Image (spheres, rainbow, N blue to C red):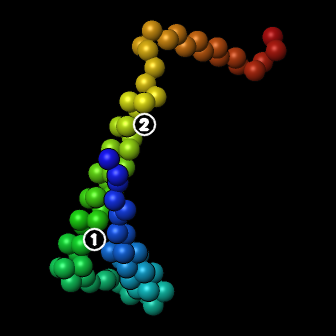
Amino acid sequence: MSIEPINTVPITAFIQQVKAADSSNQKEIRLPIADAKNLAFTLGIVMARLNGDLEKFVKENAKSSDEIISVKIDSGVGW
């Protein structure tokens, strides 16, 4: 299964709009609904991809629950 690249242009455009508003000391920005929808859909796709990648990573790197982990706590004081 090949993974299609994500079009991140709406995210980049939003970041640039925020930077421009900040540098000109604007109190707010406005987005046309079409731009807001594109940004929301793109963020949804990015988050879904990241979640899928994380699940795949966890599944591939899962270890047996029989593993024993020992922890030794030392106060650092040489008494």
- Residue type beneath disc 1: Leu
| Residue occupied by mark 2 | 57
Q: How many callouts does the rendering have?
A: 2
Looking at this view, name the residue that lies furthest to the left: 33
Towards the viewer: 73 or 20: 20
Q: Quadrant of the C terminus?
A: top right
Q: Is residue 12 above or below residue 72?
A: below
Q: Quadrant of residue 12?
A: bottom left
Towards the viewer: 74 or 41: 41
| Residue occupied by mark 1 | 39
Q: CA distance from mark 1 to mark 2?
A: 27 Å
Name the residue rendered at 28%, 58% in the picture. 45
From where the camera sits, is residue 18 visible? no
Name the residue rendered at 37%, 37% in the picture. 56
Could you tell me residue 72's position as x and y percent? 64, 14
Indicate which disc, 1 or 2, sits on the residue closer to the N terminus: 1
Could you tell me residue 20's position as x and y percent? 44, 86
